Image: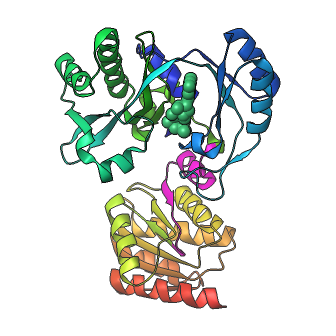
Amino acid sequence: MKVHEYQAKEVLRKYGVPTPRGIVSNTARKAREATELLGGSVVVKAQIHAGGRGKGGGVKLAGNADEAERQATTIIGMNLVTHQTGPQGRKVKRVLIEEQLPINREIYLGIVMDRAAGKPVFMASAQGGMDIEEIAEKNPEAILKETIGSGGMRAFQARRLAFGLGITGEAFGPSVQAMLALSRTYEESDASLIEINPFVLTDDGRAVALDAKMDIDDNSLFRHPDLAALRDPDEEEPLETEAINQGLNYIKLDGNVGCMVNGAGLAMATMDIIQYAGGMPANFLDVGGGANKDQIKHGFRIILSDSNVKAILINIFGGILKVDVLAEGIVAAAQELDIDVPMVLRLEGTNVDRGREILESSGLDFAVAADMKAAAEQAVARAVQHNEQ
Ligand code: GDP
Ligand code: MN
């Protein structure tokens, strides 16, 4: 789950990471009042779940309250397009008004999960403000790394990073403290990513998180009600939000073969085999090992809400989820929803014969494939046919 910059900064502050003073505003009027409260020059920053806002015109400096109000008028309601939003852009609903800082240096800091090591890795680069992907490609040795072991990042590791970044003088201590606090934030909030770009050193020796991007592991939200409350459904794919509410694991993709599968591994394999058969999956959907009739119905609803879907491949290996239960779910869904795309089924496992009976006697239009490969080939072929109709 992504959160907004202003929300990430609230979390960071709780753990002792210094951030600029700021006030979030959803109208230009409030932006003016915020500027007056903060006093002096401010930065007006669009709050959307995407980076690259500066280059896209979503981050503007303002010298006084008049200017801030004017900038906020332009930014609130604008459709902000950045290299991370895609060409359709994102509608800006709020701006963060922040005090301007006397920036001396911009540094990159980030923590992500290193899947090979199975541990988080703390990354730092002296080339702050730049895209880390670009640095990683052109100048990988410019990225310093420290693997975070159990018990969190050690003080010597933070000092080694600060040395490596060439931080000296009065900013050294605060930088080390901020890095350790950042690592604690990552661990204790079950984040999957934190990125501070830029982390700045000021002319007066402070070390401050000027920008903040934070993703929280969805699977941990049950134990962080305060973080779960930061969810902004307006920023999310509506179908994915509905799936979350139904306890389904759904990711929208760009292809035209809808997938209804039980088990994440089988769902991944199904997407692969659809591509192998020359097609493109429209989604990842894991209805789970213990899905009930209702969830199957919701799964269908979600798949069918995507107008790109031209065929549905149902690939079920009945274990805990028995095939006959699934079959009942499919029939119930088909009776309620107006399913006008061809369906191809591959069923295996517990109660498969009873499941087939239920489907065959339902009068629904579907094809039962012999195995996974055949199912994928049929689904891809039917999607092409249906698209041409
Ligand atoms: P992003 O473009 O979405 O990553 O947004 P950032 O928060 O990183 O802002 C983009 C750029 O605006 C930063 O890299 C800074 O150069 C600049 N910026 C942001 N806040 C301030 C500030 O307080 N003072 C100054 N001088 N520049 C700022
Ligand atoms: Mn940034």
Magenta stretch contains residue 126: no
- Quarter the C terminus occupies: bottom right
Q: Position of residue 300 (x, y in %)?
A: 57, 65
Magenta stretch contains residue 242: yes
- Give whichever of 90, 81 is nearer the camera: 81
- Residue drawn at 34 percent across, 18 percent down: 181
Give the magenta-colored segment's residue range. 235-257
Q: Position of residue 20 (x, y in %)?
A: 54, 17
> Within the image, what quadrant is residue 383 found in?
bottom right
> Within the image, what quadrant is residue 91 found in?
top right
Image side of residue 322 versus residue 103, left or right: left
- Residue drawn at 32 percent across, 27 percent down: 187
Instruction: In the rendered view, tell whether residue 88 sits above or below residue 44.
Output: below
Instruction: In the rendered view, tell whether residue 123 sits above or below residue 141.
Output: above
- Give whichever of 106, 304 is nearer the camera: 106
Image side of residue 243 versus residue 151, left or right: right
- Residue drawn at 61 percent across, 80 percent down: 341
Instruction: In the rendered view, tell whether residue 134 sits above or below residue 316.
Output: above
Q: Position of residue 308 (x, y in %)?
A: 61, 73
